[in-house]
Amino acid sequence: MRRLYFLIPDVATARTVVDELLLARIEERHIHVIAKEGVALEDLPEASLLQKSDFVPAVERGLALGGATGALAGLAALAFPPAGLVLGGGAVLSIALAGAGMGAWLSGMIGMDVANSQLKTFESGLEKGQLLMLVDVPKARVDEIDTLVKQHHPEAQIGGTEPTIPAFP
């Protein structure tokens, strides 16, 4: 899946684009709309907190760093056992998994409060009252959907494509 970004001038145009995407067999759960605070989206599919925040990248970083830290702590405990305890490989694995879990949880909480770094390039358009539409499409349909929006809505600004999107949001 790829994520396409479109800056749409107003709610009426966004509603038309969503209808055309639905007719092109893009499911509504793959369409997300972001607007500045105070803009009524009416029946448009609003982006969730996962799309608006840096939660997923933060969890990925925390999982990796926490797992690595836990593995190092486990290896240190194996090399220098505390109070004569005999530790094996299972203890190292357990400590690494605990570190990964803690890292993912803590960084996810922090990432929830940080705005999505992918959206920084669209902040000026959002401040002007435009709407940002995020559309998740299969890789094979990227050009088709891009062309569809360009042909029917030349006023829409194509914001590019994110190469990969997380599988679970």
Image (spheres, grey):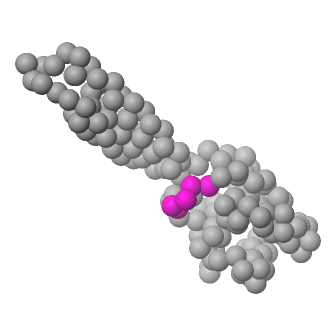
- Residue 142: x and y, percent? 79, 63
Asked if residue 23 is positioned above or below residue 90 in the image, the reply reads below
Q: In this rendering, would 132 be left or right of 99?
A: right
Tell me residue 107's x, y (percent).
41, 41
Q: Residue at x 92, y 71 (%)?
A: 151
167 relative to 63 in the view: left or right: right
Residue drawn at 63 percent across, 77 percent down: 28
Is residue 118 located in the magenta-colored stretch of the structure?
Answer: no
Asked if residue 55 shows in the view, the reply is yes
Residue placed furthest toward the front: 88
Q: In the displayed orientation, state which residue is furthest to the top.
A: 80
- Classify residue 37 by image quadrant: bottom right
| Residue 8 shows in this picture | no
Magenta stretch, residue numbers: 165-169
Q: Nearer the viewer, residue 8 or 141?
A: 141
Considering depth in this image, is 139 or 151 the residue closer to the camera?
139
Looking at the image, residue 74 lies above or below residue 22: above
Residue at 53%, 45% (x, y): give it: 57
- Relative placement, left or right, of 74 versus 134 is left
Residue 7 lies, in percent from the top left, at 77, 61
